Amino acid sequence: MKKVLILSGSPRKGGNSDVLCDEFAKGALSKGNEVEKIFISEQEIAPCKGCYYCAKHEGKCVIDDGMADILQKIIDCDTLVLASPVYFYSVSAQLKAVIDRTLARWTEIKNKDLFYIMTAAEEDSDTMDGTLACLRGFAKCIDGYEEKGVLYGKGVQKRGEVKYRPELMQIAFEMGESV
């Protein structure tokens, strides 16, 4: 059994990337894993100030918000799922704030299996290149990471539209099963 943490970076509850997170969770749960999904938009997460207070205070951030708990969960999990809609060819502001705030204790994030879930209205072949580069850039900062799967949810715009794309729902479920 693995401890799976899903970070849903969608600003829309029930948005396409959020729905795929739920499907991933179902797959992971079906194999007996422990799964927690955090809908980031419901958390108070301020952007990193770049002040490096954390470097002088044993990883404690100067900002007192919900990030300390999330960061501990990132450190403690075995499998980390990062999910985001594509916003101007990158990740959502919500997910980027979480990624940046891992600075406080990033050297403690080790040995993670990583999955990425991305959704976009466009279907162009390069639509998700910037988003994936951002996620992989974060991964490069993690000692002992292994990329286990990438879901490209193209051609979905309206909230929940991905539910009518069984092939994408199946990929999300199967990725979860593979944990």
Image (tube, rainbow, N blue to C red):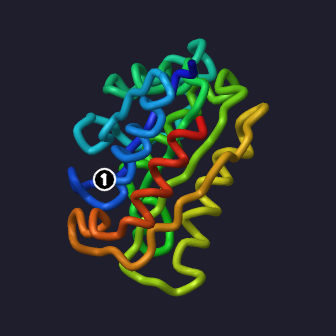
Residue 133: quadrant of the picture:
bottom right
90 is higher (above) or lower (below) than 134: below
Image point (49%, 24%), residue name: 33
| Within-10-Å neighbours for mark 1: few <14, some 14–19, many 20+ | many
- Work out which residue is located at the far right of the displayed protein and give it: 144
Q: Considering depth in this image, is 64 or 133 the residue closer to the camera?
A: 133
Q: The N terminus is located in which quarter?
A: top right
At which x and y percent is residue 95? 42, 48
Q: Which residue is depicted at the point 63% across and 29% down?
A: 106
Residue 16 coordinates in the image, percent (x, y): 31, 61
Identify which residue is drawn at 42% across, 27% down: 35
Q: Position of residue 179 (x, y in %)?
A: 59, 35
- Eyeballing the image, is 108 above or below 135? above
Residue sitting nearer the eye, 139 or 63:
139
Pick out the residue farthest to the bottom. Answer: 124
Q: Residue at x 28, y 69 (%)?
A: 164
Q: Which residue is mark 1?
A: 19
